[in-house]
Amino acid sequence: MKPDIRVVHDSRAIAGESPVWSQGEQALYWCDVMAPALHRLEPTTRQHRSWALPNLTGSIAVRQRGGLVAATRDGFVFIDMPSGDVTPIVNPEPQLKDNTFNDGRCDPQGRFWAGSSWLGPDGRYRDAPAQPTGTIYRLDADLTCHAIVPGIGETNTFAWSPDERTIYFGDSSRAAVIYAADWDGATGTIRNRREFVRTNQGTGIHDGSAIDAEGCLWTCFWEGWRIVRYAPNGRIDRIVELPVERPTSCTFGGADLRTLYVTTAHWYLDDAALAKQPLAGKLLAFEPGVRGMPDALFAG
């Protein structure tokens, strides 16, 4: 089955990222990392709002108390709604001036996970130093911040299995691996980390992911023109070809969680490349034929 891929919102992001669905609001939030902005869309009414943000913002999550939590170049912050005002929480890496936060997501218990990555002065992750400077952090509801996984080159992908026994997280730098690990929801800790899939197979670089109710991982491939659905055993179950070279992340939304929303980018594409993919940077969606898992809310 080839899905009907459509444009949901036609503003062109330099690097659209971190789509998150608010079931209570029936609204989608996402950000533009490199032209820092927050977007909110109600698909049924097509009402859209955007807010300029003061710094590079790699990932967001909706809060139980209203508003958002975000991971930025200056660490974790709150974003008030509807004003868009930003309030700092904690910067766990003040000494690493070339690091910024990238992908992030809330675990089922409401903790916010996000990983830092080196980002050079021209904004190219690929020129990172040989020794990775990134770390995956966990921000708890009491706003304490914990370093969980050091030595990460570029954090991309966070997901939890429907039975809440497995966490997935990835490093899309030279490692090019999505890992699985045993998950303890009570303590927010992981053990028995192992390779789930190695993604340097010449079809792009793995980026953000979402998980469906059958436990399969839908992963966007930057420079790969595709989303890949991985079965729980790591086998490729399905490939969905996209009309854009640089899909960045995805999440399930809609009242029944049967729509997959996909953020995209036109970062560093020249005029010739853009002419071949006029949808680059736009928000896309399609129905994959399976229900997704809801995005968890930040408990803090």
Image (tube, grey):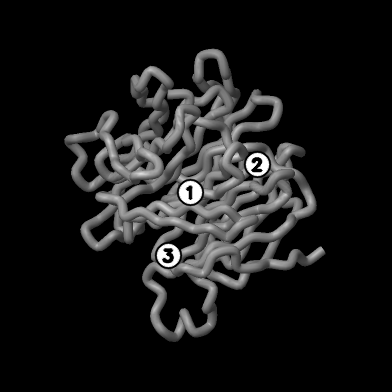
Left or right: 8, with 132 as reference point: right
Circle 2 crowding by C-alpha within 10 Å: few under 14, some 14–19, many from 20 = many
Tell me the distance, in whole angstroms, between the alpha carbons under discs 3 and 1: 12 Å
- Name the residue rendered at 21%, 58% in the picture: 121
Circle 3 crowding by C-alpha within 10 Å: few under 14, some 14–19, many from 20 = many
The secondary structure type at the circle numbered 3 is loop
Q: Looking at this view, is 12 or 167 the one in front?
A: 12
Of the two numbered discs 2 and 1 in the rendering, the one whose residue sits closer to the viewer: 1
Disc 2 or 1, which lies upstream in sequence? 1
Q: Which residue is mark 3?
A: 13
Which quadrant, please, contains the N terminus? Answer: bottom right
Residue type for callout 2: Ile
Tell me the distance, in whole angstroms, between the alpha carbons under discs 2 and 1: 14 Å
Q: Position of residue 151 (x, y in %)?
A: 36, 36
Examine the rendered structure and indicate whether residue 208 appears above or below residue 141.
Answer: below
Of the two numbered discs 2 and 3 in the rendering, the one whose residue sits closer to the viewer: 3
Q: Which residue is mark 2?
A: 211
Q: Position of residue 108 (x, y in %)?
A: 58, 27
Q: Looking at this view, is 40 or 169 the one in front?
A: 40
Residue type for callout 1: Ser
Residue sticking out furthest to the top? 186
Q: State the image quarter where residue 243 is shown.
A: bottom right
Residue type for callout 3: Ala
